[in-house]
Image (cartoon, coloured by chain):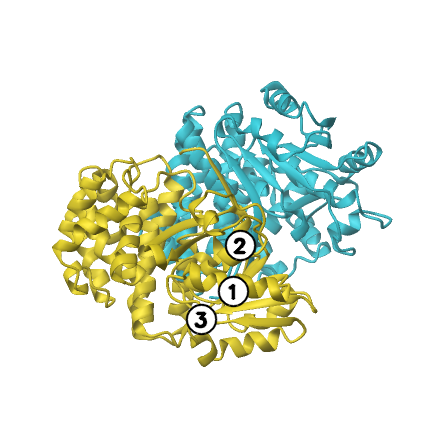
Chain colours: A yellow, B cyan
Amino acid sequence: MQNFTFCNPTKILFGKGRIQDLAKEIPAGQRVLVTYGGGSALANGTLGEVREALRHAVVTEFGGIEPNPSYETLCKAVKLARETGAEFLLAVGGGSVMDGTKFIAAAVPFTGEDPWDLVTRKAPVKAALPFGTVLTMPATGSEMNSGAVITRRSIGAKLPFGSPLLFPRFSVLDPEKTYSLPPRQIGNGIVDAFVHTVEQYLTYPADAPMQDEFSEGILRTLIRVGPRTLAEPENYEARAAFVWAATLALNGLIGAGVPQDWATHMIGHELTALHGLDHAQSLAVVLPAMLEERFEAKKAKLVQYADRVWGLESPAEAIEATRTFFESLGVKTRLKDYGVSPDAIPALLEALKTHGMTALGERRDVTLEVSRRVLERAL
Amino acid sequence: MQNFTFCNPTKILFGKGRIQDLAKEIPAGQRVLVTYGGGSALANGTLGEVREALRHAVVTEFGGIEPNPSYETLCKAVKLARETGAEFLLAVGGGSVMDGTKFIAAAVPFTGEDPWDLVTRKAPVKAALPFGTVLTMPATGSEMNSGAVITRRSIGAKLPFGSPLLFPRFSVLDPEKTYSLPPRQIGNGIVDAFVHTVEQYLTYPADAPMQDEFSEGILRTLIRVGPRTLAEPENYEARAAFVWAATLALNGLIGAGVPQDWATHMIGHELTALHGLDHAQSLAVVLPAMLEERFEAKKAKLVQYADRVWGLESPAEAIEATRTFFESLGVKTRLKDYGVSPDAIPALLEALKTHGMTALGERRDVTLEVSRRVLERAL
């Protein structure tokens, strides 16, 4: 096991009816900026419940944070937070709203010229407004970690950033608040959580049996409850298991003390930025191709993955089972399914190069040439 | 899954050489009371390393916290902490030193007459000195939770207490610092972590697949690495896996959202208080008897335990495998092995009654009569 530091102070409020506990977490009279996305939180009643729970606070609202939250939109929220003297932020939504709110939290007290510097790491995050979240879409794990991915549309960039100051103070996880999500978002969410886990697990053996056991447990749970929660969106038990699995997939625990990959994510980000694939779609396309391309480098762990996660002897069959699983969730796994043709590859590689993504993976040996072969396999 | 609230803010510093990071966690000039036990932390050099790392702090030391830390001893430490104006406590030891330090942390700012009221819950914990830990013995999980068990020898009582204010700020987990432990303490530690997990897992099905997966992962890991770390105390990888498994067994995660038992612990506490069994010895005696006695009530989970943890079809065989596992670690599983005869049972039941332990277990149906049968089965 590698040395590691692990600290995750986010308080999880899990279960039915937990939105009413917001009143205990946010003191009366506090100036709160509630952030949300495209209106589904309003339509399904979650935002109304939040307003009711916060009736003793001074609430301003900022809606319209889009999927793959953009610097451009978020800067408007930063301006509003400053104007209203917000003391606390409350993100009501999925990964995009939560990620965007992390940027807002860091940008409001930022005294430099351009808060984009926080994303490019030119400037460190030295302070952040406290914030909480109310989850309406399980998948990204953002409700229990300190990272975010921000897109700057004007320059076609999608970059990860984070800081230990950016853990939510609390997150409300009420599985019922996710019932109204369309199947596409649930399918995406299952793939997203699955690939988060694989990025931290499917590398090389590192004498970390607890981390392996926990990762395999998450993967098996997603395989078991994923199809059920897709088919029966109001089956509380299946949805609750999915929500909790997705949170555990990216709260830092399974990745502590082990090598991590994340090459699939980095290539996927370019597909989203240049071709508009949903985040999970990009992962479903890249992961099977990545595992095929890096078969020998990952073989020891692929054998373990095949055996313990899929009950298969053959690692090649486990990769195929992974692809079939994603497809069964309604998430296509080929570039051509999304209208991306071979001639798009040079621009994708150029974008990777521009963003410094020329040595990816757990051994930093996923060069641009390897990424090119991965994309070719994904056609 | 049941509704739950989970929050564990303890920062884990895991791995070789992490004691030197104490200097980053405790500001220079701070007045620190370092607590430790019977001298093994001194003999094996851990205390020396701690002193070196804290050379910029103002350090006072309090040694002699005994196994099953006593109110009587701890009150002396509280007096010393007050006299020296301690601003931070640092526990260097195993569960007893850490548990004892939690009591000291709560008792120092306590303004009532008798800090024992904190243990009996007559008085709530309203404030606590901040504290960290340096682990020298894996087992109890105290390094990453907010609970403790305190003994008051004068009245033969051993009681659990805790507060969200009693999480360590940080815990240093360097597996190498546990190499010098005698086999008895390692065997005990493996049993302790195993039974902690079972108490949160082996109840009744609760539609909590993640919690089941994580618990089963801990149990399998203890079964795999336990014998190895006992046989090869300086095998870093085996010891590191054991240390991390033991921490995860009782940091609140696997017990969140599921029914919990703890009847074995409560009966075990009386065996320790009245007959001096090591904590883990008491658990090794009570657990197999408890599982036999409550076979029907726990049958669904016992079948799952047999299958997933032991690869066995028969739950009765899984109980027998559990007993054999404990014995293989050098921890005896019968009362007679510790010189406790049938005529000791009435006093044990009387002690349970005195401490209000008359309705134990996940369904609160472990009455004194059931406890009597458990003890008889354990003879």
Q: Residue A135: image x %, image y %?
A: 47, 66
Residue at horizontal 44 percent and vertical 47 percent from the top: A253
Q: Residue B42: image x %, image y %?
A: 64, 21
Amino acid type at circle 2 is Ala
The residue tagged 3 is A64
Q: Are marks 1 and 3 on the same chain?
A: yes
| Left or right: A156 in relation to A54 | left
Q: CA distance from mark 2 to mark 1?
A: 10 Å
Residue at horizontal 44 percent and vertical 43 percent from the top: B323
The residue tagged 1 is A77
Q: Residue A362: image x %, image y %?
A: 31, 38
For the residue pair B198 and A49, the one nearer the viewer reads as A49
The residue tagged 2 is A107
Q: Secondary structure at mark 1?
A: helix
Give whichever of discs 1 and 3 has the lower sequence position. 3
Q: Is residue A311 visible?
A: no
Q: CA distance from mark 1 to mark 3?
A: 10 Å
Residue A3 drawn above or below residue A378: above
Whether pointer 2 and pointer 1 mark residues with C-beta atoms closer than 8 Å, the reply is: no
Whether pointer 2 and pointer 3 mark residues with C-beta atoms closer than 8 Å, the reply is: no
Give whichever of discs 2 and 1 has the lower sequence position. 1
Please state, as top left, top right, bottom left or bottom right, where the C terminus of chain B lies in the image: top right
Amino acid type at circle 3 is Gly
Residue A53 drawn above or below residue A293: below
Q: Are marks 2 and 3 on the same chain?
A: yes
Q: Quadrant of residue B90?
A: top right
> Seen from this angle, which residue lies furthest right?
B113
Give whichever of discs 2 and 3 has the lower sequence position. 3
